[in-house]
Image (spheres, rainbow, N blue to C red):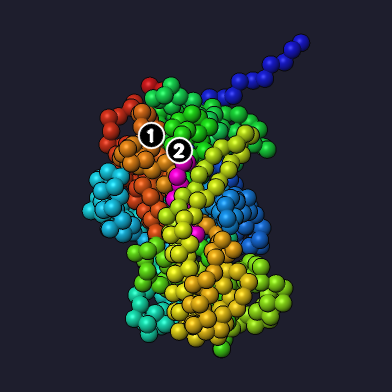
Amino acid sequence: MTRHPRPPRAVPCDALVIGSGAGGAVAALELARAGLHTIVLEEGPRTTTAELAATAPAENLRRLYRDAGLSPILGNPVIPYGEGRCVGGSTVVNGGLLWAPPDALLERWARVMGTTDYRSDRLAGHMRTVSDRLGVGEQPHGSGNADSKLLADAADALGWSWSAARRAAPGCAHRNRCPTGCPSGAKRSMLVSYLPEAERYGARIEPATRAVLLRHDDRTVHSVCALGGPGGRTRVNYRPRTVFLAAGAVGSALLLQRSGIHPRTAGRAMGFHVNFRLVARFAGPVHAAQGTIFTAQLREFAGLGIHVMAANLTAGALAAALAGHGPAVVNTLLGDLERVAVYTVQVRMSGRVTVRRLPRAGRLLRHRITAYDHGLLRFALGRAARVLFRAGAVELYPPCPGVLRSDRAAQEFAARSDPRGWSLVSVHAMASCPMGRPASGGVCDQDGRPYGFANLRLCDASVLPGPTGVSPQGTVMAFAHEIAARHLCAPPQSPLRRHGDRDTTP
């Protein structure tokens, strides 16, 4: 007797949200609150605050990041890209920094890309909603943040502008583990804020479930094929009336390519920021390991997309920041940990990353950093070094082998150093499927819909018209709120009604 495999079960719903990070969580909450039967698919696992606290940071890094935070962006140099892969997405493993998008940036996008409905006056209400729900406020220095205070005092001495960090972390307990999940629950990631509220309104979150294909007729997505269950081998077909795609700048572009939706333009030119680290040794103790991620951010060069801030200091983080400097340097600084701090310099790139799918769910990321970007990186290093020597640093270790012992030496080094030999990382990718006019490179309209599609909307970092130059979570969430609101204001589509535990179509 021949056994035929069972066809994958079909699951109907009003709205299927693919991804549970900053954009997907917003969509899930707003759709569920409006009474729509909403299902959220998340490729990664679900965790809890108790599990985060009980698990070693290295294990959380492995569990909660894609490729343990080391997805390579090929080029010269190769740049590791880190993104969250868990319920709550990257909001679980970031610093909780939340800035509104700059007015000038939104105006430029409106002028260049045609996103005239996304100016600051339209997004301001959404930003207030986000800030209120997440308890966003200025992070005081407190005890244990001497590294941030030294940065702020040095900026004042130079006459440079800085801001207290605006973080979604009310009651921060300074546990110093932001990048591997907050062990106190003070950081208001999507895991502990938007998603539980969405569940209270009836949304269903399905972790360890990966969407692999959108089936469509070039206008309407009829079903979504996903893999879940033990080992990720159980096939499930979802039949949503509307799909909200929020799989991240890389994941959303890849899913569109795999599904034959704008395959030539999705992922063709993804925007990104890069970070490099400067390790500073001071004359006296700073005890940076006792503080939170940072409480001050240098913003003097924000117009260029450059920001300087302290970073979480642990023995492991210090060793990673000194990669390439050799064991003698690492051991010396580990032995002098109380006088050491690590600073991150974030720089917006003008070059772009191409995202291409490979067979068997593979991916290929390749960057094209420009000569302008090389100059901007050197400029950023020189200015960061200046403020840190003013802060009292006696030695700086740059993102390549060497040691700098004066501002003059740092400026000379910055002028001649080649960033292609630096250790760079990225944790911010966006604009892989940008909103905007097709003639300007836009993939989606102002409702977040890929051109030609009626029931598919993108609502994550992929839909931003360009790189933000600031931490993008606030911008992503504001855009997602607007995209969800536009959907809910559209003509109704006869939603599924919930009767007890069963979903039936009317």
The mark found on residue 53 in the picture is none
**Tag 1's secondary structure?**
loop
Left or right of 330 on screen, residue 158 = left
Quadrant containing the C terminus is top left
| Residue in the picture at 33% in, 59% down | 100
Q: Name the outermost residue toward the left.
A: 121
Q: Nearer the viewer, mark 2 or mark 1?
A: 2
Question: What residue is shown with label 1?
Answer: 450
Residue 382 in picture, x, y percent from top left: 47, 74
Circle nearer the N terminus (2, 1)? 2
Residue 1 in picture, x, y percent from top left: 76, 10
388 w.r.t. 376: above or below: below
**Label 2–label 1 contact, CB within 8 A:** yes
Residue 270 in picture, x, y percent from top left: 46, 47
Q: Can residue 199 be spotted in the picture?
A: no
| Residue in the picture at 37% in, 29% down | 453
Question: What residue is shown with label 2?
Answer: 266
| Dot 2 alpha-carbon crowd within 10 angstroms: few under 14, some 14 to 19, many 20 or more | many
For the residue pair 361 and 477, the one nearer the viewer reads as 361
* Identity, as a three-letter code, of the amino acid under mark 2: Ala
Q: Which residues are magenta?
A: 266-274
298 w.r.t. 203: above or below: below
40 w.r.t. 73: above or below: above
